[in-house]
Structure formats: C-alpha cells, structure tokens
Image (cartoon, grey):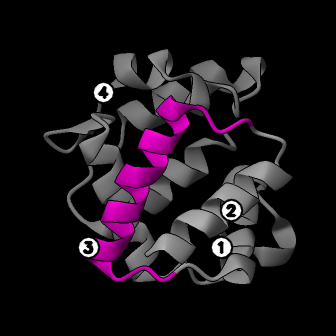
Amino acid sequence: MQSFKLSLLLFATLMIVYVTPELWGILNVFEECAETNGFIMDGKKLGQILGVIFNGDKKQQSLEIPQEFLCTERCYHEKMGFIEEGKFNLEKVKADKYVMQNIPSYKIEGFLNCLKEIEVTECEDMIKSFECRHT
C-alpha cells in the first residue's frame, strides 16, 4: 500500500499542498479505508472522480463512481467523525479546514443545509454528499 500513499502524496504535491503531519494522518485513514474496501488507486481514474466531485466536471458526469470508492469515502467520513449514526456532524464538517477550504464562501450555507438532509445508510449515499458541493 506504500505506492498508494506515494500516489496520494504526489497528487497533493501537484495540487501545491504542503503535506503536514495532520494531513499525513488523514491520508493514513483514507489508505486504511481504501484497503478495507478494495479501492485500488488509479491516478487517472481518481483524477476523473475528483473532477466530478470537486468541480462538477460536466465532461465526466457519465462517469460511474466505483462502489469501492464510495465505500472508502463512507468509511473515511465515519472514522474522521464527519458521519455519526448515519448523519453528517455539521459542527465537525464546519470545523475542518480541509473540507471548508474547497467550498466557496457563498456556497457554504447551501452545502451544510444539503448535508443536513442526507441519511447515510449505504455507500451510495455518499454521492448525495458530493452533489452538495454544487448547490
């Protein structure tokens, strides 16, 4: 799994992100969840998935997000405390700089209201949370 961490580190470097010990810990949680759920890092595919999630990339809208990725995301959000008992912990989400730095200030209220309405009972429910980024 070392290559997974290396790929994420390279991706972060390309995004001009300084990998702090805190961020390294986050990557460890993601790696653990990816391994548990059988998500195999493929740089091109991950780039396409992230293009849809973060940018609402219309060219990639038909992209089917793999079940393994959705389950990895659910696992990650639960382990980080963003999801508790099937609901998003909005206070935890608001307090996380890595989440909030990717949401334009004029979209924050809509984003949080959207998350509040989601009940996460299966991995596919994570798609709803991705859509909240674009409300």
Foreground pick, 68 / 40: 40
Foreground pick, 120 / 50: 50
**Does the magenta run of residues contain 28?**
yes
Foreground pick, 47 / 3: 3
Residue shown at the point (40%, 52%) measured from the top left: 28
User: In the displayed image of the protein, which residue is found farthest to the left?
Assistant: 85
Foreground pick, 32 / 93: 32
Q: Kindly state the secondary structure of the residue where label 1 is placed.
A: helix
Residue shown at the point (74%, 74%) measured from the top left: 48
- Residue labelled with disc 2: 50
Along the horizontal axis of the image, is 61 left or right of 22? Answer: right
Task: Give yes or no for contact between labels 3 and 1 (Cβ–Cβ under 8 Å).
Answer: no
Q: Kindly state the secondary structure of the residue where label 3 is placed.
A: helix
Q: Residues in magenta? A: 18-40
Task: Estimate the x, y position of residue 22 in percent, counting from the top left.
Answer: 48, 30
Task: Give yes or no for contact between labels 1 and 4 (Cβ–Cβ under 8 Å).
Answer: no
The amino acid sitting under disc 4 is Asn
Mark 1 to mark 4 CA distance (whole Å): 26 Å
The amino acid sitting under disc 1 is Leu
**Does the magenta run of residues contain 116?**
no
What crowding class fits label 3: few (fewer than 14 Cα within 10 Å), some (14-19), or many (20 or more)?
few
Along the horizontal axis of the image, is 131 left or right of 134? Answer: left
- Residue labelled with disc 4: 89
The amino acid sitting under disc 2 is Leu
Which of pointers 3 and 2 indicates the residue nearer the eye? 3
Q: Kindly state the secondary structure of the residue where label 4 is placed.
A: loop
57 versus 41 height, above or below: above
Task: Give yes or no for contact between labels 2 and 1 (Cβ–Cβ under 8 Å).
Answer: yes
Mark 2 to mark 1 CA distance (whole Å): 6 Å
Along the horizontal axis of the image, is 85 left or right of 97? Answer: left
- Residue labelled with disc 3: 36
